[in-house]
Image: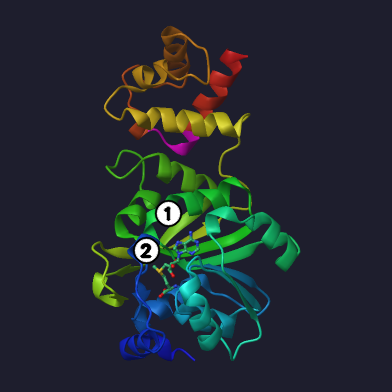
Amino acid sequence: MGELIQPQKTAEILQKYKFHFQKKFGQNFLIDSHVMNKIIAAASVSKDEFVLEIGPGIGTMTQFLCEFAGFVTAVEIDHNLIPILQDTLSMYSNVEVMNEDILKIDIRKLADEKNNGKPIKVVANLPYYITTPIIMGLFESHVPLKSVTVMVQKEVADRMKAEPGTKNYGALSLAVQYYAKPEIAAIVPPNCFMPRPSVGSAVICLKCHEEPPVHVKDEKLLFDLIRASFNQRRKTLVNGLNNFSKIALKKEQIQICIEKMGLSASVRGETLSLEQFANLADLLYEYGH
Ligand code: SAM
């Protein structure tokens, strides 16, 4: 087990199957055993758990997951990788490979079927071109989740973890932190992949909250509000929300809500915490109804 993580073994398999990397699928295969150990440690998978792996590639990480998990479902879009996966995973009976686009499958249904609706773990070296839709898709479709441990672009990991008032703070930070507690498990340079990506990477472990840290009257309104507040970063919150189509309030009314929270009328959205956005969403909700 685990030999594929050696660069020459990965190269051998690719050559054996005459595999050509497809840039459009974000194919950068992991070839560093220290990083692999960090991912596996961060995910801390056990034999009574079901794991969903997104984009198994040639099965390098899948082999590790099969060793530690009860059952692994690996979803891979590239049909050229399927015969390779059949080969590299042939010694495991606790794995199923699906040749599908992760954005097109009903993951909630998959979790219901494979794990009786109990919370699952997601572990992946993600294709970077669809990081945000994958992660937000998991959260917003309310897939029962314990944790999501993923390799992402370093810059995206920084945005997920960012605190209010910092330059990386934005809609992604708030959305991720509403659902989970992010922890960076490793910083990963380009030479840990074949081929090398043009950007730095990081492994981030999102430990999902059992209960959201804030409770609001209308969850959708909270996220619409967050998006609208960061759409025009340089504007004050009042001006940014003035064109907020989801709620028909006049500028003065928005200003009253903001002042009711003890904030200055010239405050910018990027300084507000999740709790403050939740308060504001509820105030706007009450005013608007
Ligand atoms: N897990 C492997 C590893 O660590 O070496 C490969 C990781 S590579 C960064 C991303 C993988 O996701 C590739 O195998 C790619 O073909 C696959 N992929 C890309 N888009 C996908 C999609 N929409 N659905 C499922 N898999 C996808």
Q: Is residue 10 above or below residue 204?
A: below
Reading the image, the residue beneath label 2 is 26
Label 2 residue SS: loop
Q: Which mark is residue 166?
A: none
Give the residues drawn in magenta, as a range. 272-276
Sequence-first disc among 1 and 2:
2
Most foreground residue, 146 or 93 = 93
Amino acid type, residue under disc 2 in the picture: Gly
The image position of residue 1, as x and y in percent, is: 49, 92
Q: Is residue 151 above or below residue 16?
A: above
Q: Is residue 249 above or below residue 21?
A: above
Query: Measuring 36% from the left and 90% from the top, which residue is drawn there?
Result: 12
Q: Is residue 109 magenta?
A: no
Q: Is residue 210 above or below residue 222?
A: below
Query: Measuring 33% from the left and 86% from the top, which residue is drawn there?
Result: 11
Q: How many marks?
A: 2
| Quadrant of the image containing the C terminus | top right
Residue count near mark 1 (Cα–Cα under 10 Å), binned few <14, some 14–19, many ≥20: few
The image position of residue 19, as x and y in percent, is: 38, 79
Label 1 residue SS: helix
Most foreground residue, 35 or 182 = 35
Q: Is residue 24 left or right of residue 208?
A: left
The image position of residue 160, as x and y in percent, is: 40, 51
Query: Measuring 40% from the left and 15% from the top, which residue is drawn there?
Result: 242
Distance, label 1 to label 2, CA atoms, is 9 Å
Q: Quadrant of residue 46?
A: bottom right
Q: Which mark is residue 130?
A: 1
Mark 2 lies within 8 Å of ligand 1 (Cβ measured):
yes
Amino acid type, residue under disc 1 in the picture: Ile
Looking at the rendering, the quadrant in which ligand 1 lies is bottom left
